[in-house]
Amino acid sequence: MTRLIIPQLGDFDEVEVIEIHIKEGDSIEKDDPLITLETEKAAMDVPSEFSGTITSLSIQLGDKISEGDLIGEIASEIQEPESKQVDEQKNNDYDLIVIGAGPGGYTAAFRAADLGLKVALVDKNSNLGGVCLNVGCIPSKAFLHAAKVIDDSKEANIVGVKFSPPEIDIDAMKSWKNNLIDGLTSGLDFLAKKRSVSVFHGEAFFQSRTSISVQLSSDEITLHFKNCIIAVGSEPLALPFLPMDPRIIDSTGALDPDHIPESILIIGGGIIGLEMATIYSSLGSNVTIVELTKALMSGTDPDLVRPLEKYLAGKCKIIKKSTQVMSGEATKEGIKIKFKQAENINEETFDSVLVAIGRKSNGPLIKLNKVGIQTDENGFIEVDNQMRTNIDNIFAIGDVVGNPMLAHKASHEGKIAAEVISGKKSFMDARCIPSVAYTDPEVAWVGLTEDQCKLENITYKKGVFPWSASGRSLTIGRKEGFTKLLFDPQSKKIIGGGIVGTNAGDLIAEISLAIEMNCDVEDIALTIHPHPTLAESIALAAEAFEGTITELYIKS
Ligand SMILES: Cc1cc2nc3c(=O)[nH]c(=O)nc-3n(C[C@H](O)[C@H](O)[C@H](O)COP(=O)(O)OP(=O)(O)OC[C@H]3O[C@@H](n4cnc5c(N)ncnc54)[C@H](O)[C@@H]3O)c2cc1C
């Protein structure tokens, strides 16, 4: 008889049994759920480690249980050797070592383990998930959601609903955000464990072309690999002339504030800077945005940025474009910043300054030169379309190989590298990678942009559908958006698209699929879209291009 025991549950203790999936006499398979527990973060199934027949049950609904408690007993058909994982951990030779457990790294490690490789995943952070889960995509979207709730409550009077001004409890907001992160990162621990991926928490450096050293909290160990994937990501660029002062923060600091500053200067009008401007203006700060170039979110078609800029201009104190930050001085009153716009120099003091001017590669920090891995002049690792570096058994993925620095690009590349290492003929041959600013309104684009077509002399024609003619857009009280599709005028194939408006980030996926599938205008226009939805605007933009649209009157 084999005892079914509650496994390690992360940080939880005394959690409630809310469902029991087995009874005496049941025949079950390995991994079938035995019970469901409710932690303060999420409901969690406890799967069986064995196949066999349940002979006894030792728990009841509502019991509070902890690691090591007995669930019941099973007459097990195959007993897994308990020491298997321990033996594997002791043996430091791996088919694959992945350095960095962000969305690129953990995806690569899990895919490779699923394909039968013995895998180690190393990260210097105590949480898996990298920038994306811990200090990037997830916390920023959590705060953006809070910002939207605040804004929605203020704008509700348009629909005849009045709320009192919202009270903001920044500590409660932070602990809500931290709980989300904990739930997701402990989910990754669980997924790694289920796949027998050995996880090491420590800083890794190359020792040779087949080994790394890992600085654990207690000692340094050497791990050996047949193949290695570098997925160490990126970190924020700093402005070296600004003083060291806790009031000068980067995106990581901005997503863990101890108070809401009365005034904040955001240096950098890119996606991250504008998402932060959306958050802090909703939280009640006086926000100033300063951007060195003449456009916000440069590289994005200006028509897509315009509605966002207009909306932000109403929420922020000022947006200074074509303006350079010359210097900063820490004073008792705040951080005094000197700006230069054309020939004019002026100064202003802010409670807080957020630097969001871009990110740099972490590649140079792991002793790449010891193994001769080539990088470009900015430290981004050069790879081929199978994510292989110039060293045959070493691959690199995600932010560390350069733009676009996006989580979905990192995870896609992670799968390719894992599959190539496992002997599959996989390639990075995606036609397009969508980009999204989760601002209000959201801005999303994919494939070719109009600016790019003009620059590269690519002929295109576009179909545009303004959301002011969308019933759904009007019902949510926001009509500033639009959807545009770019087509090759000869073949009528879709080559790009952009959306500005509520939920643009979700809607862009359809255009990405259309580009991947090489759709022409009829494929899109003749696909029946549900009404009334914002997604409809994609078909209507295609109809506008074809001249078959009835929702607008376009003189032929
Ligand atoms: C504020 C913010 C918001 C963002 N929002 C979005 C978004 O909405 N959508 C989107 O697609 N992207 C977003 N991004 C970008 C996204 O987070 C990154 O593109 C993504 O995390 C890159 O994944 P990665 O696997 O390459 O590396 P990372 O996520 O950077 O992970 C690298 C990991 O390597 C570890 N590491 C580094 N050096 C070592 C070492 N020597 N030894 C061991 N471990 C090491 C680090 O601890 C880290 O965990 C955002 C970024 C920021 C900063």
Image (cartoon, rainbow, N blue to C red):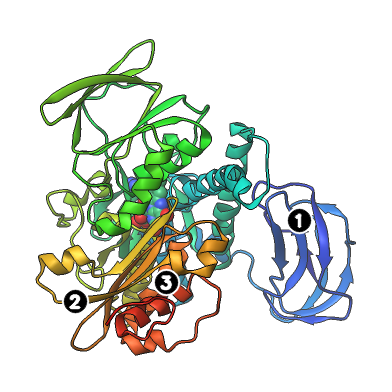
Q: Quadrant of the N terminus?
A: bottom right
Of tags 1 and 2, the one toward the viewer is 2
Of tags 2 and 3, the one toward the viewer is 2
Q: Is residue 215 visible?
A: no
Q: Quadrant of the C terminus?
A: bottom left
Q: Are marks 1 and 3 in contact (CB under 8 Å)?
A: no
67 up-or-down from 30: above or below: above
Dot 2 surroundings within 10 Å: few (below 14), some, or many (20 or more)?
Answer: many
Residue at position x 68%, y 36% in the image: 164
Residue at position x 18%, y 88% in the image: 490
Q: Find residue 62 and report its horizontal and vertical position in percent.
A: 88, 56
Dot 1 surroundings within 10 Å: few (below 14), some, or many (20 or more)?
Answer: some
Of the residues shown, which amino acid type is indicated by label 2?
Tyr
Q: Secondary structure at mark 3?
A: helix
Q: Secondary structure at mark 1?
A: strand
Of the residues shown, which amino acid type is indicated by label 1?
Glu
Residue at position x 18%, y 63% in the image: 451
Distance between the alpha carbons at the discs numbered 2 and 3: 21 Å
Distance between the alpha carbons at the discs numbered 1 and 3: 34 Å
Q: Find residue 367 and report its horizontal and vertical position in percent.
A: 23, 47
11 up-or-down from 229: above or below: above
Residue pointed to by mark 1 = 38
Q: Earlier in the sequence, mark 1 or mark 2?
A: 1
Q: Find residue 320 and report its horizontal and vertical position in percent.
A: 26, 35
Q: Nearer the viewer, residue 46 or 255?
A: 255
